[in-house]
């Protein structure tokens, strides 16, 4: 049975920036669209959240909430370096890794095939992934499940979340639709509004709908949502093979 792990660094643009400038750790930090007073706040650190700063407000509003606010723009160089470091951490555990594509910043998937003789459990493997990412200056969540999409949803829950084989629907049914972040996808805002209008709040609500009827109303996006809500994979993992040596202890190094 296929087992896939998803390694996820939340709030990745901020994590990458802090990794490149460690002095920013723990300060009220935001990333805004520009340095203009009316610029939209795009990403908010935990310290800034505690001061009441939220995404979507203007830079001027954010500065009114905390006088010590630090505002930065996204750094492509920092994000590229951080993404490479996450991929390296993943490849230190599995030779079959798929880095996230556009819109999947801070995300890496791993095929766990053949790793059972290297780690005593999936929990031990997940802990090793978390430790490897910490060593390159970031904190990561890990999800392990039967396919790419479920592993990602598990990682989005934070910490380490392992979905045992046969328990996929138990995990999916309670998840709120908000965890899909539909608004960030093309055409997703309209889709999210439609689902809310219908009174659908959880993936389990979607799973009970007729796929053909939903497809007629919402098109291929509706069909994809039903498949996801029922635990089906939308596409297989497409990993590339990393090149690592095996140490004397038999662990990828």
Image: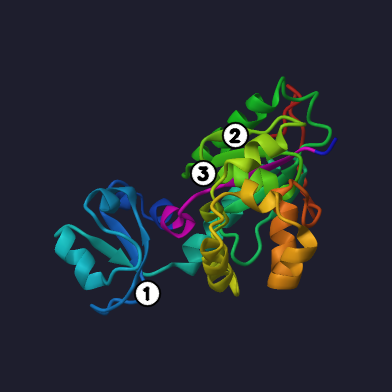
Query: What's the mark number on residue 25?
Result: none
Question: Which comes sooner in the sequence, label 2 or label 1?
Answer: 1
Considering only vertical position in the picture, is 243 above or below 65? above
Question: Which comes sooner in the sequence, label 2 or label 3?
Answer: 3
- Which numbered mark, 2 or 1, is in the foreground of this view? 2
Which residue is painted at 27% across and 72% down in the image? 58
- Which numbered mark, 2 or 3, is in the foreground of this view? 2
Q: Secondary structure at mark 3?
A: loop
Range of magenta residues: 3-16
Q: CA distance from mark 2 to mark 3?
A: 22 Å
Residue 87's spot in the image, x, y percent?
Answer: 64, 50
Which residue is painted at 75% across and 45% down in the image? 147
101, 165: nearer the viewer: 165
**247 is within the stretch colored magenta:** no
Instruction: Report the side of 23 relative to 185 (left or right).
Output: left
The quarter in which the C terminus is drawn is top right
Which residue is painted at 60% across and 74% down in the image? 186
Which residue is the site of mark 3?
Answer: 136
Q: Residues within 10 Å of mark 3 (few under 14, many from 20)?
A: some
Which residue is the site of mark 1?
Answer: 33
Residue 139 seen from this side? yes
36, 143: nearer the viewer: 143
- Tell me the quarter of the picture where residue 64 sits: bottom left
Q: Residues within 10 Å of mark 1 (few under 14, many from 20)?
A: some
156, 12: nearer the viewer: 156
Residue 87 seen from this side? no
The quarter in which the N terminus is drawn is top right
Instruction: Report the side of 200 relative to 48 (left or right).
Output: right
Q: Secondary structure at mark 1?
A: loop
Q: CB of mark 1 within 8 Å of CB of mark 3?
A: no
Which residue is the site of mark 2?
Answer: 161
């Amino acid at each position: 049975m296929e087992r896939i792990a998803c390694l996820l660094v939340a709030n990745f643009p901020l994590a990458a920036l802090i990794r490149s400038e460690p002095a920013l750790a723990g300060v009220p930090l935001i990333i805004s669209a520009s340095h203009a007073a009316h610029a939209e706040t795009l990403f908010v650190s935990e310290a800034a959240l505690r001061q009441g700063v939220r995404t979507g407000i203007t830079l001027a509003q954010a500065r009114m909430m905390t006088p010590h606010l630090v505002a930065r723009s996204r750094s492509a160089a920092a994000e590229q370096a951080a993404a490479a470091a996450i991929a390296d951490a993943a490849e230190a555990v599995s030779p079959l890794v798929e880095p996230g594509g556009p819109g999947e910043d801070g995300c890496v998937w791993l095929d766990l095939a053949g790793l059972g003789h290297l780690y005593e459990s999936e929990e031990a493997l997940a802990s090793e992934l978390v430790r490897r990412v910490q060593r390159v200056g970031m904190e990561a969540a890990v999800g392990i499940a039967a396919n790419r999409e479920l592993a990602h949803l598990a990682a989005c829950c934070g910490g380490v979340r392992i979905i045992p084989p046969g328990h996929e629907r138990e995990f999916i049914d309670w998840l709120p639709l908000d965890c899909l972040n539909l608004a960030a996808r093309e055409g997703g805002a309209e889709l999210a509004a439609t689902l809310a209008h219908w009174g659908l709040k959880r993936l389990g609500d979607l799973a009970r709908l007729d796929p053909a009827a939903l497809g007629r109303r919402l098109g291929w996006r509706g069909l994809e949502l039903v498949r996801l809500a029922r635990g089906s994979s939308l596409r297989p993992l497409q990993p590339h093979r990393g090149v690592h040596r095996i140490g004397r202890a038999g662990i990828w190094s």
